[in-house]
Structures are given as structure tokens and as C-alpha cells.
Amino acid sequence: MTPKKLITHDGSFHTDDVFACAALSLMLEKQGEKFEIIRTRDPEIIKNGDYVFDVGGFYDEGKNKFDHHQISGAGRRTPSGNEGQEGIEYSSFGLVWKKFGEKLSGSGEAAELVDRRLVSPIDAHDNGFDLVEKKYDVFPYLIQDFFRVMRPTWREEDVNINEMFFESVLIAKKLLLREITHAKDTILSNQSVISIYNSTKDKSFIILDKNYPSSEILNKLPEVFFVVYPAASDGSWRVKAVRNDSKSFKNRKDFPASWAGLRDEELQKITGVPDAVFCHRALFMAVAKSKEGAISLAQKALVI
């Protein structure tokens, strides 16, 4: 079997070409196909590539050409299927994911989750699109910063940049697989949370049977102020305030300020809940030893 040729540019690398290479590698491995990765800017080699990404000046999904550096670019996300990501331009990773993401993820819904969490932010950064507002002299440490430091510095003349690229691709493959796993499990957890929500009469707080990753789905349920769930680590039960937005720290309703930072007997005395354990000083979480105690904390927090 003649190996497929995956072609990208040589020299310095960025997060989008690293992840585009990782995604294509995973897809071909899944199909049992052999391939080789070639880093070059030689137009003759590029012309004969089976998959060409982030180089070549041409985008054609049907021919597996995934560059976005041409004057016209390679398109932007539209409202259909990309809620909240409209207008973000595609980079090479996004173009590869648009074609093969569903095949790699197992469903369109999982592919969309991965796009929102990982692919779109990488595409936005590569195209100079700001996603966050600078408020301080520090900035969030992004996945792009990690792969930036994977490149040799100006002093590391003895470091082989191709070796660093291939090492980065191995890391990106692991990360992409983990994002796919989390996306699939998030879909299942969302289904469980919605089922519990639908069967709950008083929707001011809901009681989960497991510690589901529920912050994003709860943001879409405006009646819910608190969620009660079991802690897998120690057998206790927790009450968590639902945030206005999963990417902010503003709660729909805080726990009472008088509970802030209290533990054990102090918290039990002020709440009247005999097995209360702790309330976070930031007023977003409280803990009890039992499910009944956690429910009681949620009920009291709602009326204070």
C-alpha cells in the first residue's frame, strides 16, 4: 500500500497546522491507512500531496486541500450549526475538522462540541480574532502558548524544529482524543440532566444522581438556581450555585453571605442543618454529609 502523503509547510509551526496534522493522522490511523508527513514549501511536492494543509494557497475540500492563507481566505463559520461562533474564520485545523470531525467524533453533535471548545478558539487565534477582552496586565494561558514554547528559541540552534513539530503532533493527538471523549460523555450527561429537570416539579433546584458536567446545560435552564449532587471522592453531597454563564463567576443566586467560609459546627449552627460541613467563602458551593442535608441547604439558601 502506497503511503498517503500529508503535506504542510516547513519552518516554524503553529497550533493550527499541528492540530490539522493530528486530526488527519487520527483519521487515517482509524481507517488503517499508512501515511507519511512531509514538511516542505516545494510546489512540486505540494502538488502531489494527498492531504495538503496550511500551505499551497488553495482550499478545495473535495481534493483535500486545506489552506487558508490565500487573499480570499477559506470562509467563516455561519449561524447554521455554529451557534455562538458565527464569523470566526477557518484556519487549516478548522477546515480539516469541518470535513472529518464528524467521522472522528462519531456524531455531528460531538463534532460541534469539539469545534466550539477547541477548534474555533484555535482558528480565531490563528486568524487574529480576539475572543476575550483584556482587563489586566496578565492574559489567559492558551493552548497556543503551550505549542509556542514547543518551538525552539532563538538560542537553541542545535534543536531540530521538525522533531519538535512531530512531538507536538503526538501531544495534540492525545488532547484531541480526550476532547472527543469528553464531548461524547457531555452529550450523555446533558441528556441525563434534562431528563431529571423535566421530571422535577420545583425547578428552583434539581437533584442529580451523579456529578455530571452540567454547567453549560444548566445555563439554558433559567429556573434552576442550585444543583444538588453526590461527590464521588468522599461520599458527601454538594450544593452548587448555577452561574449566569458557564464562562463567568457570577451566580444566579449566591449562598447567604453569613455562611461564607464557615465549617462544621459554625455552619450547622447558623443553617440549622446538623450535618452541614462547609460553605465556600465565594458563596458558590456548600457541602453536607448526606443528601438530605444538601437538599436542606439548597432550600434554605433559596429563601434567605
Image (spheres, grey):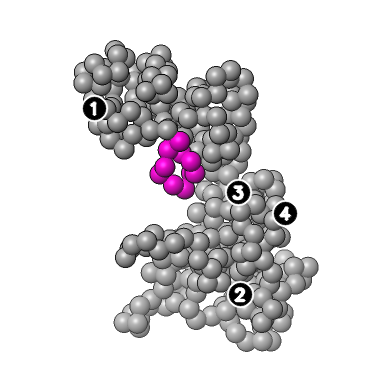
Residue in the foreground of this view, choosing between 128 and 100: 128
Q: Amino acid at mark 2?
A: Asp
Q: Is residue 238 left or right of residue 123?
A: left
Q: Amino acid at mark 4?
A: Ser
Q: Amino acid at mark 3?
A: Leu
Residue for badge 4: 80
Q: Which mark is residue 54?
A: 2
Of labels 1 and 3, the one closer to you: 1
Q: Position of residue 95 (x, y in %)?
A: 66, 65
Q: How far, Cα to Cα, is label 1 from label 3?
A: 38 Å
User: Is disc 4 in contact with disc 1, using a CB cutoff of under 8 Å?
Assistant: no
**Residue at disc 4, secondary structure:** loop
Residue for badge 3: 113
Residue 172's place in the image compared with 291, above or below, is below
Question: How many numbered callouts?
Answer: 4
Mark closest to the chain's N terminus, 4 or 3: 4
Q: Is residue 140 left or right of residue 77?
A: left
Residue for badge 1: 262
**Residue at disc 2, secondary structure:** loop
